[in-house]
Structure formats: C-alpha cells, structure tokens
Amino acid sequence: MAHATLRITELGKSLPEPVQKTGWFVFEWIPIALVAGFWEIISGSFVSSEILPPFSEVVLATWEIIVTGQILPHIQVSLFRVTAGLGMSIIVGVLLGIGMARLQSVENFFEVPLALIYPLPKIALVPLAILWLGVGTATSVLIVFLACLLPIVLNSYNAAQNVDQNLIWSVQMMGMDSWKIPLKVVVPATIPSILTGIRQAIPIAFISLVGAELVASNRGVGFEILRHGQIGNYTSMFAVIVVISLIAFFSVRVYEWGERRLVQWT
C-alpha cells in the first residue's frame, strides 16, 4: 500500500504543474461532492424534504439570494462586525502576548484572567453583553473580539518567549535602547507565529459571529438564519448557511495566500 502511494505521488510530480494543481483542486473537493450527493439522496427518501431540502434546491436558493441581492446587506453588516472584532483582537492580542512574554509583571497581572476566560464558551457571555451593550453590532463585535483574542495572545506569547536571546544581547551591545527592542527585534521575529494565530482566529471569528447574531441581532447573516428557521423556510436557511460558509472558507484561503507571500518577504 505504501509503495503504491509512493508511486502515485511520484507520478503526480512528473506531470505538468497546471495538471498537478487541477488534480489537487479536484481531489480537495471530492469529499464535498460526496456529502452533496448523499444529501441529495437522503432528502425526501430517508428524511422529509420539508426538514432537509434537496441539495440542488439549496444551491438554487443560494444563487437566488445572491443574484437578487437580498442577502448582501446582511453580509455587509456581518463582515463589518467580524472585521472589527478580529481587528481589535489582533491589536490587543499581539501587544498583550508580547508584553506578557517580555515583562514578568504583565504576565503575572493577566495570566489568571486569561486562564479563566480561555475555557469559557464565549457565546455564554451574549446575555451579559446584551445587558451592557444592547442588541446589535457592539455585542457581536465584543463576542468576536473575546473569541479571537486567546489564539492570538498564545501564539504571540510563545513566539516572543522563543526569540533568540543572543539576538537581543547583540542589539543591546550595539547600543539599541531597551524600549526599541520589542518593536525592532521581537515583533519582526514573531511575525510568522502571529500570522499563524490570526489564521486560527479567522474561522473562530465567523463561528462566534453567527452565534452572537442568532441571539443578539436584528441584522446580519446569523439573524437571517434564525429568521428563516423560525418561519420554516429551511431551503433559504440552508442557503444562508452555505453563503456564510463560503465566505469563511475563501477568507481563510485568501489570508493563507497573503500569509505565504508575507512570510517569504520577511
């Protein structure tokens, strides 16, 4: 079996690059095609089509809500919320992670609160956020911020702790001021790990956003999912789920593309 796998891999490498890319693209999407086919088969046969509409109908409904533009205002609201929450978590998370790694006092101050918040499902804070901020954008942004904060803090912290101490000693011997070291030495050395933390946070941002909008919003993609589900329009409900899934998927892919180029440049 291992020998056959090796032969297939070698054969793939011998093919032209465009053919290789096309082959891998098709291979990556095979599981989705299998799920779609299984979904189409069981809908109306093993499961009522009223509860689980056929996949083909969901695809048509997805196309319709995009072409007609009825979902676009909700997408704009959701993208603003996820961008704001994720952006805030990147700024705070990077500063906090590096600060905890380089200053013992900062680590001692934030270690226990972060350890308590880390295992807590952030969606559980939605009722409290509603009391503080009301129903709407502020609550969703806060939940996204809290959900994305920890992965970025942890990656920044671990990377800053692992910076080669010899590098820091070298710049100190060259006369660099202590306050410049985090900005000019530590941050550049931690960029790859920080980027990894951001990549981990992107899907978390969309998950927490939809969860918050299901409870604490009158606009947005999560609100549309809830609204269609409450009136029994399950085809449109699944269509909205497909839309937000595709947005999250391509957001990660675009980010990975940019990350590879940035890491090469740095």
Image: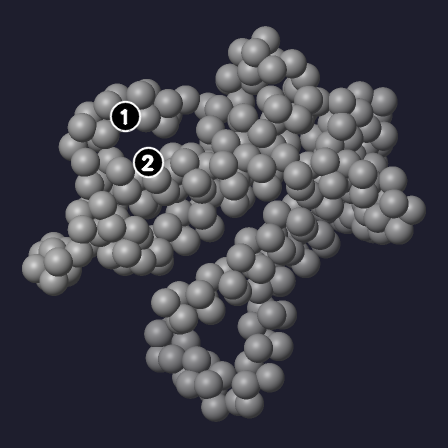
Q: How many marks?
A: 2
Say above or below: 129 vs 122: above
Of the residues under marks 2 and 1, which one precedes in the sequence?
A: 2
Density class for disc 2 (Cα within 10 Å; few <14, some 14-19, many ≥20) is many
Residue found 50% across the figure and 32% down from its top: 145
- Circle 2/circle 1 CB separation < 8 Å: yes
Q: In front here: 83 or 253?
A: 83
Give the quarter of the image for residue 214: top right
| Quarter of the image where the N terminus is located | bottom left
Residue on which disc 1 sits: 110
Residue found 53% across the figure and 89% down from its top: 15
Drawn side of residue 26 relative to residue 235, left or right: left
Q: In front here: 194 or 247?
A: 194
Residue on which disc 2 sits: 96
Horizontal and vertical percent position of residue 130 = 61, 13
Density class for disc 1 (Cα within 10 Å; few <14, some 14-19, many ≥20) is few
Horizontal and vertical percent position of residue 262 = 44, 65
Drawn side of residue 127 relative to residue 238, left or right: left
